[in-house]
Image: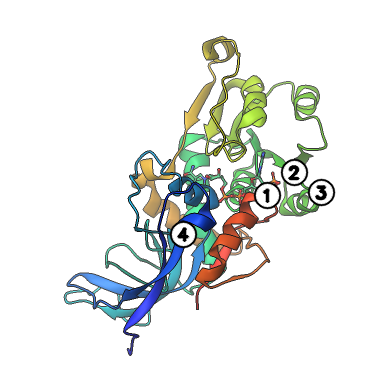
Amino acid sequence: MPHPSSYRKLIIQQLTGDFRNSTHIVEQAWQDPAAGEVIVRNHYAGCNAIFDKNLCRNAIRYVDVQPPFDMGIEAVGEVVAVGAGVTRLAAGDTVAVSRLGNGYREYQRVEASKPLKIREASPEILALIPSGISAMVGLERIGEVRPGDTVAVSAAAGGLGHFVVQLAKLRGCHVIALTGSEEKRALLSQLGADRVINYKQDNLRDILAKEYPDGLDVAYDSAGGEIFDIFVDHLAMRGRLVISGHTSDFDKPVENIPHPRMYRKLYWKSASIRGFQNQSFPEFFDEAAERILDLYYRGRLQAWVEPQTFDGLEQVSDAVEFLLSGRNTGKVVIKLC
Ligand SMILES: NC(=O)c1ccc[n+]([C@@H]2O[C@H](COP(=O)([O-])OP(=O)(O)OC[C@H]3O[C@@H](n4cnc5c(N)ncnc54)[C@H](OP(=O)(O)O)[C@@H]3O)[C@@H](O)[C@H]2O)c1
């Protein structure tokens, strides 16, 4: 296939703590794939605003960001060149790739073992991989969800959260979905959530105490802050709280909260709090990817993509700021070609 002599990518140029001021678009000279590699033309990239902003503060524990640093993680696109010895992929294959540094760029060079073959390089598939996979692994493997469980989900209309809601419903759970907006409340009801709570308007603590006296079997939290505290207090006997992020305060100074020691809250209930960061559980990903795509292709799972469009690398900062404003519904996606 013909290819350009160079293409564009987004890098961290300086660590300012702010995404827009830290990043810059630069030209990358074309390099043919080495043996065992392929080149993918990225069609859509997924926005992980919180992770992205944390990179710009060098605040991701397992990455040491030294500018210039390539940005972006997940993308879907088309294989345009294959290196010597590659047999599992061919030019024209559509693939999804999740790899740090490979998302916010027009082309990516990657080991041929990494891309996942998909039917089409659509924004919906991009939403499923990896956010849907993370939702599945977090809920099933870390939350150990069981049929009949009462499951609460924060940021339930978000890129990750709307998958958690649906997967819990497919397991036969009663699902309590949290959101901060009335429009998203209506959408979450349509998605099948049994109880939708607008945490900005309703009193979450009172509702849980009154309507769910037996507590939450699984609380899937990516909001943190007060929502996390309330979830801890309302865990059921043997309840599991999955920490999947803390959007509400990730870029704020660490708060020191006067609290009884955690064992006072957990021990007598045999309840637990479990951290979940997807990169710590790679062993579950292939199986989850297969199952989540199968659910989607069979029409059992919706993949929500935020309707606001973001076009090209110039609008990645807009996408990041949009997500951080809390206005998004579903996965925020950047169109690259
Ligand atoms: N564990 C993992 O491996 C993993 C993987 C991917 C992402 N994550 C984490 O999961 C979270 C969601 O990521 P995402 O990309 O899917 O984003 P998202 O949920 O699509 O977007 C963030 C949402 O959080 C809610 N929110 C914003 N400020 C909040 C606040 N102060 N209190 C409560 N909720 C607030 C907003 O929804 P409402 O207005 O509806 O509340 C907003 O739409 C992030 O914390 C991310 O770092 C974790």
Kindly tell me whether mark 1's CB lies below 8 Å from ligand 1.
yes
Mark 3 vs mark 4: in front: 4
Residue 23's disc is 4
User: Residue at point 49% right, 61% down?
Assistant: 293
Left or right of 278, for residue 62? left
Residue tagged 1: 326
State the separation of the CA atoms marked 3 and 4: 34 Å
The amino acid at mark 3 is Glu
Residue tagged 3: 182
Most foreground residue, 264 or 302: 264
Left or right of 220, for residue 37? left
Is disc 1 in contact with disc 3, using a CB cutoff of under 8 Å?
A: no
Left or right of 83, for residue 296? right
When asked about the image quadrant of residue 289, the answer is bottom left
State the separation of the CA atoms marked 1 and 3: 13 Å
Give the percent coordinates (x, y) of residue 241.
56, 29
Other residues around mark 4 within 10 Å, as few (<14) / some (14–19) / many (≥20): many
Kindly tell me whether mark 2's CB lies below 8 Å from ligand 1.
yes
Left or right of 159, for residue 96? left
User: Residue at point 42% right, 74% down?
Assistant: 106
Looking at marks 1 and 4 on the same chain, the residue that comes earlier in the sequence is marked by 4
Residue 332 seen in the figure: no
Is the image coloured rainbow, by chain, by secondary structure, or in one colour? rainbow
The amino acid at mark 1 is Gly
